Image (spheres, helix red, strand yellow):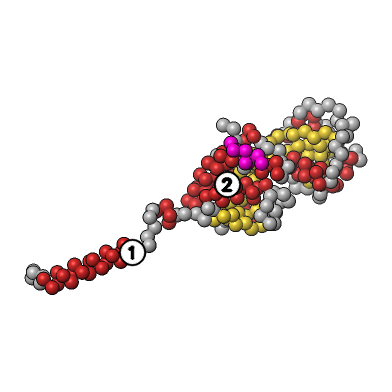
């Protein structure tokens, strides 16, 4: 092999020096973590009044924003029917949907955090003159019950030992309240959050009514099965406890007149 001349060595040295300077001047990410930095979470959901409002407000939306925005993650949302939301999350077209029961998330092969975002209480409302003594769920035995069409409470495991005398379905809240008020049905079963909302918006006088919680079901943000989602879940699990302990989470619930399920985040 021939020895390199002095001039060739000088040229090679100069080339290496220039290449090194250019390399050092290039803007490179300082860590691998910066390459993976999450800036957005995409949420798909039906539009629920006071929970997922069109303008991005509402209890569920504000929980998501309060969890993620301090980490520099903005919430992007789209309104779609429930079944489509499930499909979009399961197929990784969206990051997450809100207020999903564990069993439904597992059926769709979605990921959920350790902690819920909400407890969906189911309650019964009735006139005091119709049911004089309440003795828990068993009080519903042999009663005429009404609920919104499609809710199918009679199929719930919580009511598996209950034999209703008659079951009725209606299309809106006002119909159900009217049937209870007129004595056509003994009890109206619905989500507590919706019962409270109707009572508040219509300024109902509850003097002659009683309202009893039947059970509570934990509801979670359900995520697509991706590496991004796993990181989002870790953030949620940390932040939701921080918000609970600081009182910020309760403030959100109080703002939207929703019962605060303290037991959901107490270890």
The residue that appears at 56% across and 39% down in the rendered structure is 242
Question: Given contact means CB atoms under 8 Å apart, are the residues at marks 2 and 1 in contact?
Answer: no
**Which residue, given by chain and number where applicable, does mark 2 sit on?**
67
The residue that appears at 62% across and 35% down in the rendered structure is 264
- Does residue 209 appear to the left or right of 41 in the view shown? right
Q: Quadrant of residue 119?
A: top right
**Which residue, given by chain and number where applicable, does mark 1 sit on?**
25
Q: Nearer the viewer, residue 82 or 154?
A: 82
Q: Can residue 88 be seen in the rendering of this structure?
A: no
Viewer-nearest of labels 2 and 1?
1
In this rendering, is residue 57 above or below 7? above
Q: Identify the element where label 2 is drawn.
A: helix
Magenta span of residues: 244-251
Say whether residue 114 is magenta.
no
Q: Quadrant of the N terminus?
A: bottom left
Q: As drawn, which residue projects farthest toward the right?
A: 182
């Amino acid at each position: 092999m021939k020895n390199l001349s002095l001039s060739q060595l000088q040229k090679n040295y100069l080339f290496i020096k220039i290449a090194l300077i250019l390399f050092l001047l290039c803007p490179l990410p300082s860590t691998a973590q910066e390459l993976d930095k999450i800036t957005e979470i995409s949420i798909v959901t039906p539009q629920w009044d006071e929970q997922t409002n069109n303008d991005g407000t509402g209890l569920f939306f504000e929980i998501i924003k309060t969890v993620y925005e301090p980490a520099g993650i903005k919430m992007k949302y789209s309104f779609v029917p429930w079944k489509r939301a499930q499909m979009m999350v399961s197929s990784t077209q969206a990051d997450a949907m809100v207020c999903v029961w564990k069993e439904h998330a597992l059926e769709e092969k979605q990921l959920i955090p350790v902690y819920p975002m909400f407890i969906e209480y189911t309650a019964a409302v009735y006139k005091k003159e119709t049911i004089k003594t309440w003795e828990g769920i068993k009080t519903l035995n042999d009663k005429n019950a009404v609920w919104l069409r499609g809710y199918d409470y009679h199929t719930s495991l919580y009511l598996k030992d209950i034999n209703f005398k008659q079951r009725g379905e209606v299309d809106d809240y006002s119909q159900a309240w009217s049937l209870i008020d007129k004595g056509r049905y003994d009890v109206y079963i619905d989500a507590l959050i919706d019962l409270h909302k109707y009572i508040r918006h219509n300024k109902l006088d509850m003097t002659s009514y009683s309202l009893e919680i039947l059970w509570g079901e934990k509801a979670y943000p359900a995520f697509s099965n991706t590496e991004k989602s796993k990181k989002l879940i870790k953030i949620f699990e940390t932040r939701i406890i921080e918000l609970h302990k600081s009182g910020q989470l309760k403030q959100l619930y109080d703002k939207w007149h929703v019962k605060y399920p303290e037991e959901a985040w107490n270890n």
